[in-house]
Amino acid sequence: IDEVVVFHALDQRHIKSIAQIQLQYLEKRLVALDMNLRVSDAALAALSQVGFDPVFGARPLKRAIQAQIENPLAKEILEGHFAAKDTILVDYDNDQIRFSKTG
């Protein structure tokens, strides 16, 4: 063994940062559709909570973002609830992720 690398466990702060990075990819895809995305602190905290596992770290986060935001938002867009030029706010209220237009 040449070297020992110690990995420290991720905490909620790290998971929140990783969630922000992952959501930036979604934001870029929406910009290509001429839409903007804003994620509230409450929604980010909820995603961080759902997407964190003490054993697996941030691995469940991508699936949580897909299940909680990407898939429902895609359905909303396809149903015509959002269109070009819209800014979509992702919020968390009453134990549920919600989408609305802002501005």
Image (cartoon, grey):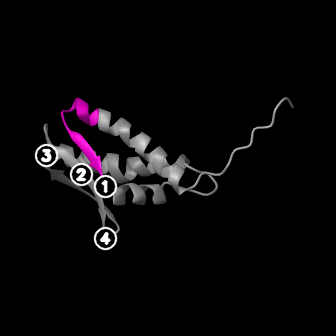
Image x and y of residue 8, in percent? 68, 48
Numbered disc total: 4
Give the percent coordinates (x, y) of residue 72.
29, 51
The amino acid at mark 3 is Gly
Q: Is residue 20 left or right of residue 71?
A: right
For mark 4, give the secondary structure.
loop
Q: Is residue 52 above or below residue 21?
A: below
In the picture of the structure, the residue carrying the numbered disc 3 is: 80
Mark 2 Cα-neighbour bin, 10 Å: few <14, some 14–19, many ≥20? some
Marker disc for residue 94: 4
Q: Regarding mark 1 in the picture, which secondary structure is present there?
A: loop
**Residue 99 visible here:** yes
Q: Is residue 29 left or right of residue 55?
A: left
From this viewpoint, which residue is outermost toward the right?
1
Judge depth for marks 4 and 1 and give the one in front: 1
**Sequence order check, earlier mark of 1 and 3:** 1
Work out how far the residue at label 1 is from the one at label 3, CA to CA, in angstroms.
22 Å
The tag earlier along the polypeptide, 3 or 2, is 3
Which residues are drawn in magenta?
A: 29-39
Q: Position of residue 82 (x, y in %)?
A: 15, 45
Packing grade of label 3 (10 A; few <14, some 14-19, many >=20) is: few
Q: CA distance from mark 2 to mark 1?
A: 7 Å
Res 62 seen here: no
